[in-house]
Amino acid sequence: MRLRLDEWGRLEIVDPGLAAVPLLRQVDPGFKVKQAPLPGFQQPRLPRTRHLPAGLSWERLADAAGDFLWELHLELLEQWEHLTDPEPLAETEVSLLDLKIELARRLLLACRLCGWQCRANRWRGESGHCGLGVEAKVVSHFVHIAEEPPINPSFNLQLAGCGLRCRFCQQGEFLDPQTVAAVPLHSGLWPQLRLKGARSFSFIGGNPEESLYAVLAFLRQAPAVWKLPIVWNCHGYSSPQALSLLDGLVDVYLPDFKFGANQCGLALAGVPDYPEVAQAAIAAMLAQGVPVIVRLLVLPGHLACCHRPALEFLATLPEPERLWVSIRGQYCPDWQIGPQDGELARRVRPEEVGEVYSLAQNLRLQVLYDL
């Protein structure tokens, strides 16, 4: 939790946990943690994926060709759709989740876990744009009370490393996994997680997709009775392979839509093709039949180049009843932003956020909005 004053003298509490509630109520006696129903959610997807048998021996799983395993993965996802009340598998049986873990491991041999698809052999110690190896690195875990109302409060498991380098990143100190203080993500962490008060379980970063292999292995050891929806809070620069492996596990996607123009993605995050990759990723998330809440952080001076085209694209997507836009007005010139960055060196104004909100409404998008 961090405290700061904005340029209008308002107190901001960044990433408040449950422990911040007394302070918030001292500042505002009427403060309440915002909550709303999660549309369409009945039960989490994880148990079905963990209990669906893959029909393979462990030896066959290790030795089979990659094409065969990907085809089997698609077939099992079709079976998964019709699976109800599955019985837990014995440890000697291979599940759909085990198959996903093996496919994620193989992706590390020529990494394709984010939109860069850099093909670094992370299994043998090479590092790509994210700087990660095989392990995922946990920098914090706590119940966060300022997420979107349908998932709030959410237990946030924060991981180091990210394929993007957004110069305004609020978590810039966690982007380089080689320098951040962190512990490996492993099954022994489960007893340390205090989930009381959480309505969902979020993987956040950095960015979680670059750590997908370790995350899937971690989920294999989740408590036997699992009731929380899993939220995938990501940068939107996602690969089709990673999203396919998340199908059947994620209950809510929470992607950013950072940039609507290639030149802005290149200048501010170092990626040449952000809009194209993010558009394909968000469409793929919706195709999995779960709620998708797209976060749009309003950047000063970027309505025409970024936010308008992003919203216009979202308005074209099918099944709009499962798509929400979360307009975020808390942009702050963090991390590497300085006076040389023009309008980005100031806070975003309320009227700029309101303009983005009005545009989203005019496009008939479902909007979650909070200045």
Image (cartoon, grey):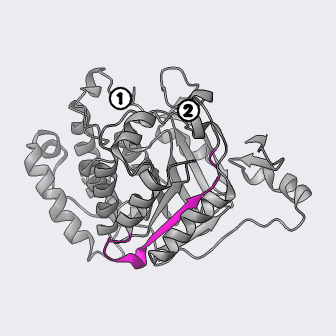
Residue depicted at 84% across the width and 47% down the height: 9
* Quadrant of the rendering where the N terminus is positioned: top right
Dot 2: few (<14), some (14–19), or many (≥20) neighbours within 10 Å?
few
Dot 1: few (<14), some (14–19), or many (≥20) neighbours within 10 Å?
some
The x, y position of residue 146, in whole percent, is 67, 57
> What residue did someone put label 1 on?
129
90 left or right, relative to 307: left
Within the magenta stretch, is there residue 5? Answer: no
> What residue did someone put label 2 on?
341
Q: Quadrant of residue 269?
A: top left
**Viewer-closest of 84 and 4:** 4
Residue depicted at 79% across the width and 51% down the height: 20
Q: Secondary structure at mark 2?
A: helix
Q: Which residues are magenta?
A: 315-331
The answer to whether residue 78 is visible is yes
Q: Quadrant of residue 170?
A: top right
